[in-house]
Image (cartoon, rainbow, N blue to C red):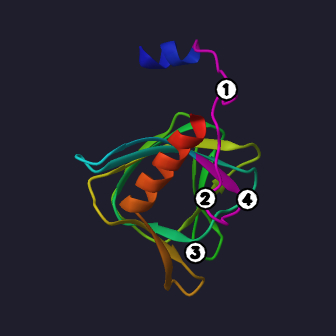
Amino acid sequence: MATAAAANTRSFAFDDRNIRWYKLGDFDYFVFAMLDVDRTRQVVDFIAKSEPNQQIFLHRHTALTNTIVLQGEHRLYEPDGSLKEVRPVGSYTSSAPGEPHREGAGAEDAIVFYSVRGKDGVLFEILDDKLNVAGTLAMADFIQAFEEQKQARS
């Protein structure tokens, strides 16, 4: 029954015209928009838009991360840049803290919703090519980004 309903469903493009995108520091190939930070539950929600056929910086998630692909393909790459996984539009994934990887898009922009859950402190480790920690993104960084983006919208 579910297969028949899915076969009759039309596809729609995600309309991001009313989203104000922001760069994250000097990082290339993606922009993001904060949606919410729940300090009590320690949940950070944001969306990211990756440029076609590009890979972002090498990193590791240090907290549970749930994603849903809203547009395009969410591609995951090994640290050496080889393709590891392709998540098509509509894919939902719940991932425990994990292995170093890069992320990116396929032939068109990828827009992915992220919900990072249940951890105070460091949420992402930024790695160099030798897998050494070169920097971090912590709960405090996302709180600051959320406040800055709220101010920019006012």
Residue positioned 77% across, 46% down in the render? 107
Q: Is 78 or 13 nearer to us in this picture? A: 13
Residue 79 is marked as 3
CA distance for labels 4 and 1 = 21 Å
Q: Residues within 10 Å of mark 4 (few under 14, many from 20)?
A: some
Which residue lies under the disc numbered 2?
24
Q: Quadrant of the N terminus?
A: top left
Which residue lies under the disc numbered 4?
54
Q: Which residues are magenta?
A: 8-32
Q: Earlier in the sequence, mark 1 or mark 3?
A: 1
Which residue lies under the disc numbered 1?
15
Residue positioned 52% across, 49% down in the render? 148
Q: Is 1 or 93 nearer to us in this picture? A: 93
Q: Is residue 66 magenta?
A: no
Whether label 1 touches label 3, CB < 8 Å: no
Q: Nearer the viewer, mark 1 or mark 3?
A: 1
Q: Is residue 28 magenta?
A: yes
CA distance for labels 1 and 2 = 22 Å
Whether label 4 touches label 2, CB < 8 Å: no
Kindly state the secondary structure of the residue where label 1 is placed: loop
